[in-house]
Image (cartoon, grey):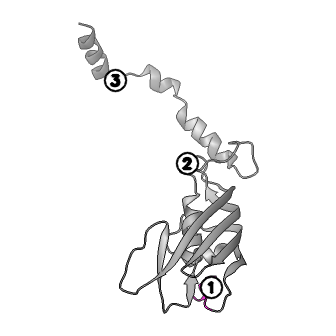
Amino acid sequence: MKSLQQYRIPFVGLKPGKHQFDFEIDERFFNEFEYSLVKTGKLQVKLELDKQETMLILDFDIRGDIFLNCDVCLADFPSPIEVVERQIAKFGDEDIEEDTEEIIVLARNEHEIDVSVLIYEYINLAVPFINRCEDEGNTQWCDKAMIAKLEELSSPKEEETNDVDPRWEALKKINKQ
């Protein structure tokens, strides 16, 4: 977690108003999270922190490519993502635990906010449910040998179609009666 120190923003010394922070995300970032869907990528994070008297408004703009495994050919391929999110962090008492998806509660004695977990969650939520190469078999990323093997295994063989189990024939006759 030592490499995630750069994602801690000390807000105590900042003047009220908007402040810009830029981060580079690569495989070192994803290695810090044990069960990450994404293992590698090249991303730019632009964070605008708007400090106000009672809260912080964090606007995230995350753009770049993440590498995913194709669900068809199993090859790694780049997938572009663009994420624009807003998170509000309000200052409250230590005994109040009102964290929700939209609002984080910071204790009054806290002096910094860690945005690494937020960035990680936004990137992982942008991963598509089904991962496929853009044009199967025709891109530099797609594993052509795997596609050929899948097509070979999915086409029925003639000898299998001619040799029908006699038990199935008997069942078909029962169905016709």
> Toward the viewer: 134 or 72?
134
Q: Amino acid at mark 3?
A: Asp
From the viewer's perspective, tell me whether residue 97 is left or right of residue 79. left
Q: Which residues are magenta?
A: 1-12
Q: Position of residue 148 (x, y in %)?
A: 64, 40
Query: Please, is residue 56 above or below residue 136 in the view?
Result: below
Compare marks 1 and 3 and give the one earlier in the sequence.
Answer: 1
Residue of label 3: 165
From the viewer's perspective, tell me whether residue 53 is left or right of residue 107. right
How far is mark 1 from mark 3, CA to CA? Answer: 70 Å
> Toward the viewer: 150 or 23?
23
Q: Amino acid at mark 1?
A: Ile
Q: Residues within 10 Å of mark 3 (few under 14, many from 20)?
A: few
Q: Position of residue 86 (x, y in %)?
A: 59, 66
Residue of label 1: 9
Compare marks 2 and 1 and give the one earlier in the sequence.
Answer: 1
The residue most toward the top is 177
How far is mark 2 from mark 1, CA to CA? Answer: 35 Å
- Identify the residue at horizontal 62%, vertical 76% (top origin): 29
| Tally of numbered discs | 3
Query: Please, is residue 83 above or below residue 154 in the view?
Result: below
Q: Position of residue 39 (x, y in %)?
A: 60, 68
Q: Nearer the viewer, mark 2 or mark 1?
A: 1
Q: Position of residue 163 (x, y in %)?
A: 41, 22
Compare marks 2 and 3 and give the one earlier in the sequence.
Answer: 2
From the viewer's perspective, tell me whether residue 167 is left or right of residue 73. left
Asked if one can make out residue 38 in the rendered structure from this viewpoint, the answer is no
- Identify the residue at horizontal 68%, vertical 65% (top origin): 61
Q: Quadrant of the C terminus?
A: top left
Q: Nearer the viewer, mark 1 or mark 3?
A: 1
Q: Secondary structure at mark 3?
A: loop
- Identify the residue at horizontal 65%, vertical 85% (top origin): 6
